[in-house]
Image (tube, grey):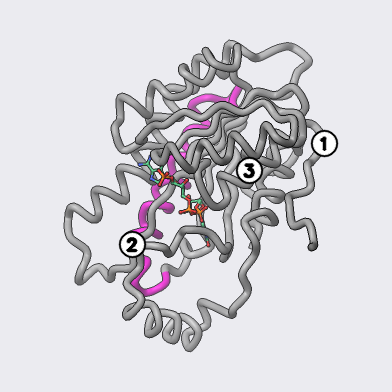
């Protein structure tokens, strides 16, 4: 059987990473590949059973991984998360914020609660994790070491939101604006935005199957969706490659 595991990029050995949203999809693949590359990882998300599987797989490969069951929709929990990770790992060098939710609901149908759930996870959670990460990341700054990194995952749907994914795209637009502002507020910090394209993950697990067919038909007809889908491992390889590329751009598109 082919080994579709992510190639482990160089430059991660000995680095201490918090991966938020590590229980499935891209975050899971990032956590596992980072461990294989010699990083120590705190894997955070809500589902404890999934996190335990990730840690078990990482440790089978000889990795250094720790599960941390947390809900970033709780701002206090999200803000505390990087400090927790630093305590577990003995410091913190990078944070990958892969947590995200994406309901399939047009603006005409999305409730205020739905908007809040998306913004709480995709934007406020990311902001609280970023704020909580500043002190532990700054504590690890050295004269000749790599700059600490905060990686935020955005979406190719932002410039031209796909019908039914407008709530999601609006949240990612806010996330991208936060990244641009944070770069100016904290110039010592590398804030890396990775624009992700279609990737086979748990992203669409909660979508109504009856609404999905017409949505994909429309996206295909209107030129949004061309059937190209990456594996979580391939996308994770792109994320980690960008993270390890010290002199690379602040915004990287994997599409
Ligand atoms: N897949 C794509 O086509 C695609 C395209 C563009 C961008 N992206 C972005 O890539 C990132 C990863 O998504 P994915 O595709 O890998 O989807 P996924 O498989 O659904 O993974 C999402 C992760 O976020 C975690 N999460 C959600 N709500 C959370 C909360 N309140 N607290 C803590 N963790 C939470 C989930 O874990 P729990 O449920 O266990 O909490 C899960 O680990 C997201 O930011 C997404 O927007 C994906």
Mark 2 to mark 3: distance in Å?
Answer: 23 Å
Between discs 2 and 3, the one toward the N terminus:
3
Q: Which residue is mark 3?
A: 30
Q: Quadrant of residue 190?
A: top right
Q: Quadrant of the C terminus?
A: bottom right
Q: Quadrant of residue 192?
A: top right
Magenta region, mostly helix, strand or loop?
Answer: helix
At mark 2, the secondary structure is loop
Task: Provide the residue span drawn in magenta.
Answer: 162-189
Q: Which mark is residue 10?
A: 1
Q: Residue at x 66, y 36 (%)?
A: 58
Mark 3 to mark 1: distance in Å?
Answer: 14 Å
Height in image: 251 above or below 96? below
Front residue of 176/129: it is 129
Q: Which residue is mark 2?
A: 103
- Where residue 114 appears, x then y in whole percent? 23, 55
Within 10 angstroms of label 3, few (less than 14), some, or many (20 or more) residues? many
Q: Which mark is residue 1?
A: none
């Amino acid at each position: 059987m082919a080994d579709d595991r992510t190639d482990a990029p160089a430059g991660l050995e000995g680095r201490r990473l918090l991966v938020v949203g590590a229980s499935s999809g891209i975050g899971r693949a990032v956590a596992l590949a980072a461990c294989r590359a010699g990083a120590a990882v705190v894997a955070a998300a809500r589902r404890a059973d999934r996190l335990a599987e990730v840690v078990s797989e990482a440790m089978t490969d000889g990795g250094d991984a720790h599960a941390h069951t947390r809900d970033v929709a709780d701002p206090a929990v999200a803000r505390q998360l990087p400090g927790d990770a630093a305590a577990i790992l003995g410091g913190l060098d990078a944070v990958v914020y892969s947590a995200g939710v994406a309901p399939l609901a047009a603006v005409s149908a999305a409730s205020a609660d739905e908007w809040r759930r998306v913004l709480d996870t995709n934007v406020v959670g990311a902001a609280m994790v970023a704020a909580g990460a500043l002190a532990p990341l700054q504590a690890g700054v050295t004269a000749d070491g790599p700059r600490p990194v905060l990686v935020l995952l955005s979406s190719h749907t932002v410039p031209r939101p796909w019908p039914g994914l407008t709530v999601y795209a609006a949240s990612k637009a806010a996330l991208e604006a936060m990244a641009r502002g944070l770069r100016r507020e904290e110039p010592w910090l590398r804030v890396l935005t990775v624009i992700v394209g279609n990737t086979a993950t748990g992203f669409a697990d909660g979508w109504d199957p009856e609404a999905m067919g017409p949505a994909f038909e429309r996206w295909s007809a209107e030129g949004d969706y061309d059937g190209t889908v990456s594996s979580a491992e391939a996308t994770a390889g792109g994320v980690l490659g960008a993270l390890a590329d010290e002199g690379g751009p602040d915004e990287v598109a994997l599409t």
